[in-house]
Amino acid sequence: MKDFIIKLSLIVLCVSACNVSGNDTTLSNVDILPQSKERKRKYIDLQKLDQVQLGETTESELYNIFSKDVDLRFTYNPVIPRKHLGIYKPVDKVITYDGAEISTEQINGGVRYMGKSSLIAIFFLYKGNIQFYSIALDIRDRENRWMSMPSKTTKDFLECQRNFKGDACLEIKCDDKFYELKVLKWDPASHLKGHYITAHDTECDWEKKDFDEILKKQGYDKLLKDPNYGKKFPRPEFGKD
């Protein structure tokens, strides 16, 4: 489970850039990448989540609510039609907080550090506003095994955990693929071999010939024109323990 959470911390944003060299592309639209020195680990207070008003809270207001110490901050240019619980929504920036609670124990004159819990919070933005978010919390049980806390994990992550081939995890792969091919404009033939993500064998909806029709039927064009579209959707739901 812990390996799964670590992988989720790279969702939508980062894995594709880990192996970028200076000859591949100019990452002018990327704020904080996995290899950036600016990365900060931050365990945010989920009780403050109610202060985030979907479609209204800005990026700077998000930092005031939680912290400027973010793990990853990534910009999508062009905008990605990001599928969330069956609906495609425009996203142009993703901000991730990734933190852990650590316990200490004195052993043989030294100190042993052990993670008690791991919390990932991912906020999806469009036109400067938070439109939706995804949360995943893992804790250690009494037998020192990692387990998820459904009541502190949004349903999109829970779906992915229940079925690794489920819709949510397909989106993870397709987000990475979109970033590599559309943002970085990588040539799949030259970058796929030995790459960390093997998403290129997955056909994503945005690659299908009828994708424009899918977006049209869902009213995607209207969302593109609405910088506050998050107000039209219910808040992401959490599971039950």
Image: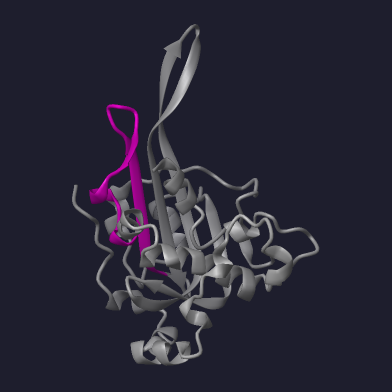
Q: Which color scheme is applied?
A: one colour
Residue 226: in sight, yes or no? yes
Q: What residue do we see at 46% from left, 87% from top? A: 211
Residue 65 rendering spot, x and y as whole percentages: 38, 53
Q: Give the range drawn in magenta.
A: 130-156
Instruction: Specify whether 67 is left or right of 198.
Output: left
Q: What residue do we see at 28% from left, 60% from top? A: 155
**Residue 88: in magenta span:** no
Q: In this view, does 2 lie above or below 223?
A: above
Residue 26: in sight, yes or no? no
Instruction: Specify whether 59 is left or right of 17.
Output: left
Count of numbered circles in the view: 0
Residue 114 rendering spot, x and y as whole percentages: 43, 27
Residue 20 rendering spot, x and y as whole percentages: 71, 59
* Image quadrant where one finds the N terminus: top left
Instruction: Specify whether 112 is left or right of 163.
Output: right
Q: What residue do we see at 69% from left, 67% from top? A: 28
- The residue most toward the top is 109
Q: What residue do we see at 24% from left, 61% from top? A: 237
Q: Between residues 35 and 16, which one lies in front from this camera angle?
A: 16
Residue 71 rendering spot, x and y as whole percentages: 52, 49
**Residue 132: in magenta span:** yes
- The residue most toward the right is 23
Q: Is residue 209 above or below residue 50?
A: below
